[in-house]
Amino acid sequence: MAILPIIEVPDPRLKTVSTRVEKFDDELKQLVEDMFETMYAAPGIGLAAIQVGVPKRVLVIDLQEPDPEAKAEDCGDEGCGHDHRPVINDPRIFINPEILDPSDEQSLYNEGCLSVPDQYAEVERPAQIRARWHDLDGKVHEEDMDGLMATCLQHEMDHLEGILFIDHLSRLKRQMVLKKLNKMRKAA
Ligand code: GNR
Ligand code: NI
């Protein structure tokens, strides 16, 4: 297991079109393990292989949504303002994913990306999709998705085509986001 460095803009590798996985071998399993460790450490809810410099069509997602059944845990820090509800872990692996019949209905989500750190912007995408992908054994799966899962999978699949969420914004908004990021980097 290893936490891998995450590539950030303007690294040109983020523009790579990733290639399909042909061999479902131990090297692939190792990559997926390292991607989960890297995503949880970041922390993030999804990661594409190209974000750790590997141009293969491999994604991991874990939405880590708060457990609606569980009560908030007291962190001891009075009024700290954070949500301390335990999350439900649901690690998902998508190899060679495809999107089938995206809905005409769109949904807006305030997206972020580990490769564009600490920057957020509203992106519109189809609200419902059907996804098809391979698992680690090469077996094919299909599932209807909506909500954050549909948004996140489409964000991750964009990475496989060398596209970032900021590429969906107007040029003005994209430049504003990149300027803010540079300002933040200089301050750090
Ligand atoms: O951690 C992430 N959060 C997120 C929020 C809204 C829409 C998409 C995402 S994915 C992002 C992690 C990432 O950069 N994946 O490529
Ligand atoms: Ni991203």
Image: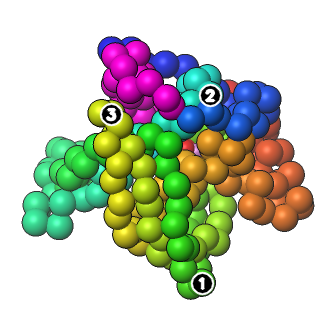
**The residue carrying mark 3 has its beta carbon less than 8 Å from ligand 1:** no
- Front tag of 2 and 3: 3
Q: Is residue 39 magenta?
A: yes
Judging from the image, the colouring scheme is rainbow
Q: Position of residue 113 (x, y in %)?
A: 59, 46
Q: Nearer the viewer, residue 101 or 66?
A: 101
Residue beneath disc 2: 55
- Separation of marks 2 and 1 at Cα, in angstroms: 30 Å
Q: Residues within 10 Å of mark 3 (few under 14, many from 20)?
A: some
The label shown at residue 136 is 3
Type of secondary structure dominating the magenta stretch: helix
**Badge 2 vs badge 1, beta-carbon distance below 8 Å:** no
Residue 153 position (above or below residue 39): below
Q: Report the side of 141 relative to 49 (left or right).
A: left
- Which secondary structure lies at badge 1? loop
The label shown at residue 104 is 1
Q: Position of residue 54 (x, y in %)?
A: 58, 24
Q: Residues within 10 Å of mark 1 (few under 14, many from 20)?
A: few
N-term-proximal mark, 2 vs 3: 2
**The residue carrying mark 1 has its beta carbon less than 8 Å from ligand 1:** no
- Which secondary structure lies at badge 2? loop
Is residue 47 at least partly visible in the picture? no
